[in-house]
Image (cartoon, rainbow, N blue to C red):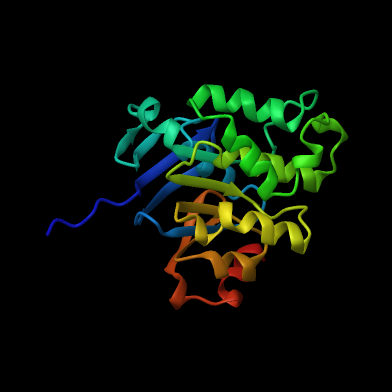
Amino acid sequence: MTEAAPAIALDGLERRYGERAALAGVSLELPAGATLAVFGANGAGKTTLLRILATLLRPHAGHARVLGGSLPRDGWKVRGRIGLLAHDPLLYRELSPRENLRFHARLHGVPTARIETLLELVGLAGRGDDPVRTLSRGLAQRVAICRAVLHEPDLLLLDEPYANLDPAAVEAVSPLVGRASGCTRVIISHDIEAGLGEADLVLGLRDGRQVLRQVRSAIDTATVRELYG
């Protein structure tokens, strides 16, 4: 039987901003359906990695394959199979949640009925027509999560997915972005215990360099905490 190709395969990945190396020599493989947790202090390269995987940045060296496509060459093929939840919620603040999601649905050919299903799931059906600028950060985060999963992607790229959410909201969105989603996931988290709880594989970055790559069962919180020292 042929072994399934990994959902993500990185080999010597590099990205620079001028003379500064934002990523330098990152290599890993992530099986389909598994979760990678990425840890590191501010400026370690976590967001740069997420943006490359989302096809928003081109690597300067090395190789990256995502969902069977080689980046950046095949970015246009795989982009529609990726859901991105960035640090910025990527919402139009003057539009309502429904209007934001309708715009995104048209891009992906998603039936509008799914919008109502998602708003109901995250407890926003009653606020769906209010401008996003009137929503709290927690409510805006719920809308951003709906946008990220609206087109039922195969790969979820999640930057602090539970930021600004109270426990009830975390419970509501977990079926969409948690392990129960069944998606391959890459999660950036500063909450070490929560991130490790989600992970199958752990990547630690420091100044753009890969200093830690472990399966979850072989690592503890103290080891990850050293990345922030």
| Above or below, comparing residue 84 to residue 181 in the picture | above
Residue at 56 percent of width and 27 percent of height: 105
Residue at 78 percent of width and 27 percent of height: 93
Q: Work out whether residue 94 or residue 35 is closer to the camera in this orientation and state it.
A: 94
| Above or below, comparing residue 95 to residue 140 in the picture | above
Q: Quadrant of residue 130?
A: top right
Residue 46 in the image: x percent, y percent? 57, 48
Q: Quadrant of residue 131?
A: top right
Residue at 63 percent of width and 26 percent of height: 102
Residue 226 in the image: x percent, y percent? 61, 69
In the displayed image of the protein, which residue is found farthest to the front?
A: 113
Q: Is residue 48 visible?
A: no
Q: Work out whether residue 7 or residue 219 is closer to the camera in this orientation and state it.
A: 7
Image quadrant where one finds the C terminus: bottom right
Q: Work out whether residue 64 or residue 150 is closer to the camera in this orientation and state it.
A: 150
In the displayed image of the protein, which residue is found farthest to the right?
A: 134
Q: Quadrant of residue 139?
A: top right
Q: Is residue 86 left or right of residue 82?
A: right
| Above or below, comparing residue 224 to residue 145 in the picture | below
Residue 165 in the image: x percent, y percent? 76, 55
Residue 100 in the image: x percent, y percent? 68, 27
Marker count (numbered): 0
